[in-house]
Image (cartoon, helix red, strand yellow):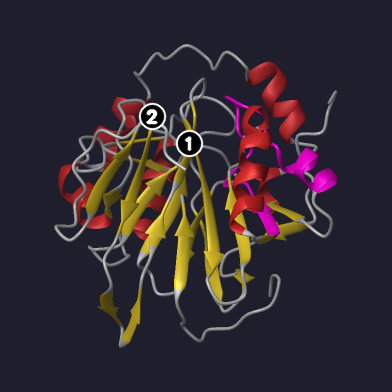
C-alpha cells in the first residue's frame, strides 16, 4: 500500500553509523571491529531462507538524547530508508548517505518523539523526492501516513508496519520483510520499554502491543530500539521475552511498575512535540 510492495527477497544491506558500542552481540557469528570512536558490526556470509547475502550494519547515535538512527539500503538498487533521524545530526547523516551513493526515498519516524526534533522536514528540503512517513494515529504531518500492515518498499526490500501503541498512540514497529529484524522505536527497549506517563501513554496498551505484535516474531529476530542509555545496541525477541525485567511480569504487575516510575519529563518535550507534529520544520 505504501511506496509499492514487492515480496521477493534479495540481498539487503543494513547500514547502521555507531558512536558507542559496549554490548556482547547475541549471535555467535558476529564480528565486532572497533574503529577509534566508532564501531562496525559485520555479519559474515550466511544462508538465510535459501539465499546467500552479506549484511553489514551501521547505527548512527545521537548523544544528547541517546537516539539511534537506522539506515537501510537495498544493495542492488541503492534505494534506502532512514528511521528516526535527529535534527542535530542531519549533516552527518546526509554526508554518510552521499558517501555510500544511496538514493534515500523515505524518512520514517516510529512515533512523535518528545526528547528530540526529527530532521525529516529539513532533510526533505535538501533531498529532492524524499518522502516523510509516520503513523496516521500520531496526529503529525507527513507525506505518508502509516497503518497496520502497510509496507515501506525500498528496492526489492520492504518493511512491514505493526502498530504498537502504548508509549504514544502513534507508535509503530517496523519489521523487515523476512522478519529477521524489527525496529521497535520507544515501544520495546533493550531490557526495558518506553514510558507511559505522557503523550497518550497507557501501560496496559503497551504491554498488549509488545506481547501481541513484537513477542510473536521469531525468537531470533533482532531488536533495534530507538534509544539505549547503557551502550547496548541490539537484542533479540527471544532475549527480551525471557529476560526483560518489566515484560516478564503479569499485566497487573507491569501496570504497577509503569505507574510508579516517577520519571522527570523529557527536557525538550515542550519544543520537540510541537515541532515533530509538523515534521520537524517548526522555527527552523
Residue that carries the numbered disc 1 in the rendered image = 202
Q: Of label 2 and label 1, which has the lower sequence position?
A: 2
- Residue 28, position in %: x, y? 14, 57
**What is the crowding at mark 2: few (fewer than 14 residues within 10 Å), some, or many (at least 20)?**
few
Query: Is residue 43 found inside the magenta-colored segment of the image?
Result: no
- Is residue 105 one of those drawn in magenta? yes
Front residue of 35/132: it is: 35
| Crowd rating for badge 1 (residues with CA inside 10 Å; few <14, some 14–19, many 20+) | many
Residues 158 and 46: in front is 46
Q: Which residues are magenta?
A: 104-126
Left or right relative to 210: residue 159:
right
- Name the side, left or right, on which 170 lies relative to 105: left
Image quarter hosting the N terminus: bottom right
Residue 71, can we see it?
yes
For disc 2, the marked residue is 37
Looking at the rendered image, the disc whose residue lies closer to the viewer, 2 or 1, is: 2
Percent across and percent down for residue 23 are 23, 37
At mark 2, the secondary structure is loop
Q: Residue at x 41, y 36 (%)?
A: 203
- The foreground one among 50 and 235 is 50
In whole angstroms, how far apart are the C-alphas of marks 2 and 1? 38 Å
Choose between 87 and 57: the one closer to the eye. Answer: 57
Amino acid at each position: 500500500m505504501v511506496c509499492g510492495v514487492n515480496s521477493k527477497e534479495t540481498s539487503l544491506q543494513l547500514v547502521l553509523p555507531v558512536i558507542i558500542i559496549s554490548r556482547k552481540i547475541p549471535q555467535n557469528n558476529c564480528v565486532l571491529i572497533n574503529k577509534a570512536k566508532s564501531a562496525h558490526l559485520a555479519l559474515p556470509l550466511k544462508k538465510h531462507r535459501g539465499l546467500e547475502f552479506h549484511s553489514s550494519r551501521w547505527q548512527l547515535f545521537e548523544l544528547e538524547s541517546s537516539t539511534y538512527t537506522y539506515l537501510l539500503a537495498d544493495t542492488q538498487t541503492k534505494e534506502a530508508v532512514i528511521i528516526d533521524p535527529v535534527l542535530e545530526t542531519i549533516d552527518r547523516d546526509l554526508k554518510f548517505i552521499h558517501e555510500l551513493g544511496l538514493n534515500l526515498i523515505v524518512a520514517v519516524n516510529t512515533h512523535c518523539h518528545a526528547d528530540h526534533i526529527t530532521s525529516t522536514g529539513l532533510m526533505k528540503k535538501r533531498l529532492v523526492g524524499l518522502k516523510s512517513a509516520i503513523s496516521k494515529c500520531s496526529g503529525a504531518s507527513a507525506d505518508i501516513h502509516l497503518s497496520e500492515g502497510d509496507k515501506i518498499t525500498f528496492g526489492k526490500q520492504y518493511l512491514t508496519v505493526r502498530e504498537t501503541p502504548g508509549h504514544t498512540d502513534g507508535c509503530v514497529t517496523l519489521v523487515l520483510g523476512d522478519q529477521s529484524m524489527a525496529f521497535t522505536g520507544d515501544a520495546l527497549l533493550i531490557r526495558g520499554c518506553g514510558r507511559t506517563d505522557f503523550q497518550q501513554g497507557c501501560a496496559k496498551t503497551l504491554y498488549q502491543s509488545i506481547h501481541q505484535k513484537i513477542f510473536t516474531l521469531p525468537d531470533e529476530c533482532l531488536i533495534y530500539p530507538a534509544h539505549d542509555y547503557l551502550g547496548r545496541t541490539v537484542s533479540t525477541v527471544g532475549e527480551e521475552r525471557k529476560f526483560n525485567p518489566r515484560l516478564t511480569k503479569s499485566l497487573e504487575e507491569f501496570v504497577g511498575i509503569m505507574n510508579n516510575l516517577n520519571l522527570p519529563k523529557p527536557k525538550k518535550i515542550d519544543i520537540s512535540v510541537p515541532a515533530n507534529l509538523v515534521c520537524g520544520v517548526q522555527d527552523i
